[in-house]
Structures are given as C-alpha cells and as structure tokens.
Image: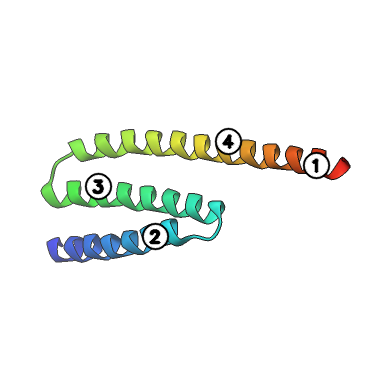
C-alpha cells in the first residue's frame, strides 16, 4: 500500500510541474486560470495522500482549509478577469465611435 501511495505522489508531482508550465507559458489568461485551479486541486490530493501515508488525520483539516482558500482565489481571479474584459470592451467601444 505504501508503494502505491509513493507512486501516486510522484505522479502527481510530475503532473503539477506540467500544469505549472502551462500556467507560465499559457497564451491566454483563461489557460493560466485553469492551470492554477488544476494545480491547487492536485496539491490538495497530494496533501491527502501524504496524510494517508503518514497515518495522520490532521492533513485532512489542512486540505479542507486549502480547498476553501483555493475556491476563493479562483472566484477572485475570475471576477478580476471579467472586470478587465468589460473595461477593455468599454474602451474599444468608445474609441470605435470617435
């Protein structure tokens, strides 16, 4: 069982690295937002796997707090993206009418 947990943790670490590359190299802001969201989900799963490996239930509490923070961060980033898009549309609309 411990070998399976270690393999899963290694695989998650590698996929987190590839998601980090997508977040840095992503051509659009939406690609970056999705990559950051996936990184946080995989990080939460990694925390839970570490807790299972160490037989410590406190990692579940840590993961729950991280879930709440991740949700709030994604909502704030999405709201910021929508505000920027609306501002850009408004500026293009006023410049096109002149």
Element at badge 4? helix
Mark 1 vs 4: CB contact within 8 A: no
- N-terminal of the pair, mark 1 or mark 4, is 4
Give the x, y percent position of residue 67: 37, 38
Q: Which mark is residue 19?
A: 2
- N-terminal of the pair, mark 4 or mark 2, is 2
Residue to which mark 1 is pinned:
95
Residue to which mark 4 is pinned:
79
Q: Which mark is residue 80?
A: none
Residue to which mark 3 is pinned:
47
Residue extending farthest to the front is: 98
Q: Residue at x 56, y 56 (%)?
A: 28
Give the x, y percent position of residue 73: 44, 36
Q: CA distance from mark 1 to mark 2?
A: 38 Å
Q: Residue at x 53, y 60 (%)?
A: 27
Give the x, y percent position of residue 59: 21, 40
Q: Quadrant of the N terminus?
A: bottom left
On the picture, is 89 further left or further right than 6? Answer: right
- N-terminal of the pair, mark 1 or mark 2, is 2
On the picture, is 1 further left or further right than 36? Answer: left
User: Is label 1 or label 2 in front?
Assistant: 1
User: Is label 1 or label 4 in front?
Assistant: 1
Sort mark 2 into few (<14), some (14-19) or many (20+) by Cα contacts within 10 Å. Answer: many
Q: Nearer the viewer, residue 90 or 53?
A: 90
Count of labels shown? 4
Q: Nearer the viewer, residue 18 or 88?
A: 88
Residue extending farthest to the right is: 97
Q: Nearer the viewer, residue 27 or 58?
A: 27
Element at badge 2? helix
Q: Residue at x 25, y 47 (%)?
A: 48
* Color encoding of the figure: rainbow
Q: CA distance from mark 3 to mark 1?
A: 50 Å
């Amino acid at each position: 069982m411990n070998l399976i947990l270690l393999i899963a943790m290694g695989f998650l670490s590698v996929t987190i690295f590839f998601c980090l590359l997508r977040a840095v190299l992503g051509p659009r802001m939406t690609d970056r937002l999705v990559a950051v969201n996936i990184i946080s989900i995989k990080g939460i799963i990694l925390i839970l796997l570490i807790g299972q490996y160490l037989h410590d239930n406190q990692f579940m509490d840590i993961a729950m707090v991280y879930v709440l923070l991740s949700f709030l961060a994604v909502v704030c980033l999405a709201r910021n993206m929508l505000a920027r898009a609306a501002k850009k549309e408004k500026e293009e609309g006023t410049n096109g009418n002149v």
